[in-house]
Amino acid sequence: MRALVLGSGLAGITAAYYLRKNGLDVTVVDRAAGPARETSYANGSMITPSLADPWNSPGVFGVLLRSLGREDSAMLLRPSALPSLIGWGIAFLRNSSQRNFERNYLSNVGLVHYSQWVMRDLLQAHAFAFDHAYDGTVKIFRNSAAYDYGVKVAHFLKQAGVQHRSLDRAALLEVEPQLHAVIDEICGGIAFPGDETGNARLFCEELRRICAADGVAFRYAENVVDIATDRKRVAGLRTAKETLAADVYVLAAGSFSATWAKHLRFELPVRQAIRSACRCIVGNNAPGCRSSTIRCTRRSSRSAAYCASPVRRSSPATTPRCVPTGSRTCAICCAACIRNSPNRPRAST
Ligand SMILES: Cc1cc2nc3c(=O)[nH]c(=O)nc-3n(C[C@H](O)[C@H](O)[C@H](O)COP(=O)(O)OP(=O)(O)OC[C@H]3O[C@@H](n4cnc5c(N)ncnc54)[C@H](O)[C@@H]3O)c2cc1C
């Protein structure tokens, strides 16, 4: 049986791996020059049950209203996007009730735990390097209101098996000595030992290599321009060069999948969005920069905005460097760079 996978990001390559494992002849098609060149390129690298909360937390309606016209909002809704969001937006808001939010949050945690379990299985079969670390993560808080909310959420997550440990400043410094430079501005932290981190792009590149060695064909730089159908069934993927046919098709084109799904007359409730991560953009190494060990993501929800810092020890051989991860608002930076950045975060993180 032949399978065609459209897209070679995290979803496409992983699907290709498991399809091959189940004995199918698999071909992956992607318009990019290599694996993980779009969403999977520079994600936050977090495999974190502690951060599985849906975006539509209670109060999100107000947050979105306030974001209208404010390009620097953590969560931004542009008026021009409103017409395309009408049906989807109503469902999004309906799910922001406290009850639905909590239910969805716990479902997401279950999904992350399942992902971690599958990943372990995969890594047992093929040990490959992608900056994977089981170090856990630490959320840090600048004020007591945000900290109290963080503790409340951490207790809520216990029922789904997410463990945590509250940290005062001294304990925080033990976990991450580099916070020394900014410790006076932090009121406490919470450690989540079950969280993991890893580089999504490297993961895709390595898994692609494993898949290719196992006979999966990869066709890069081939844009799928149409999906041919025959009596409501997919008949092939049309590229500029030819029509590729298979017995099974996997749509893994990221946010573009929704457009293709519409073309195939089924509704995929996915919309494109960008979530703001860190707004302290660090271009150059700050004086005192030691290594890129802290990934800082700022989130703003109804009552909490916080800094999450998955701590990863970089090897001594690594040249210390603070680098933007590729997205406009996301940066990997160390505490010294946050401190010295002209754009350091000022919100109640
Ligand atoms: C800033 C940011 C931070 C994130 N942080 C995290 C995180 O910390 N943890 C986490 O779990 N998730 C995170 N995510 C989400 C995660 O990165 C995505 O869910 C994941 O990468 C999606 O993978 P995908 O394979 O579905 O899509 P993509 O990686 O976008 O892959 C889709 C592929 O389809 C190809 N394609 C599309 N259309 C066509 C076409 N017509 N013809 C041929 N090829 C086509 C594209 O070239 C692309 O390679 C983050 C996302 C962003 C944007």
Image: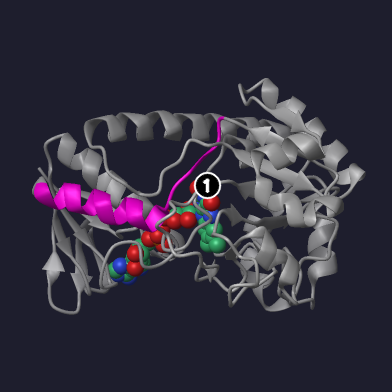
Q: Which contiguous range is marked in magenta?
A: 194-213
Chief SS of the magenta region? helix
Q: Position of residue 233 (x, y in %)?
A: 25, 53
* Closer to the camera in the image, 328 or 333: 333
Label 1 sits on residue: 312
* Closer to the camera in the image, 25 or 244: 25
Q: Position of residue 27 (x, y in %)?
A: 15, 55
Q: Is residue 79 above or below residue 85?
A: below
Asked if the stretch drawn in magenta spans residue 202, the answer is yes
Residue at 31 percent of width and 29 percent of height: 121
Q: Position of residue 334 (x, y in %)?
A: 62, 60
Q: Quadrant of the C terminus?
A: bottom right
Q: Is residue 222 visible?
A: yes
Left or right position of 265 against 88: left
Residue at 49 percent of width and 51 percent of height: 45
Q: Quadrant of the N terminus?
A: top left
Left or right position of 131 against 123: right
Q: Quadrant of residue 72?
A: bottom right
Residue at 26 percent of width and 67 percent of height: 34
Left or right position of 291 against 186: left
Ligand 1 located in image quadrant: bottom left
Q: Position of residue 6 (x, y in %)?
A: 28, 59
Q: Residues within 10 Å of mark 1 (few under 14, many from 20)?
A: many
Q: Quadrant of residue 322?
A: bottom right
Asked if the stretch drawn in magenta spans residue 105, the answer is no
* Closer to the camera in the image, 211 or 318: 318
Residue at 41 percent of width and 43 percent of height: 132
Q: Disc 1 residue type?
A: Arg
Q: Is residue 271 visible?
A: no
> What colouring does the structure picture have?
one colour
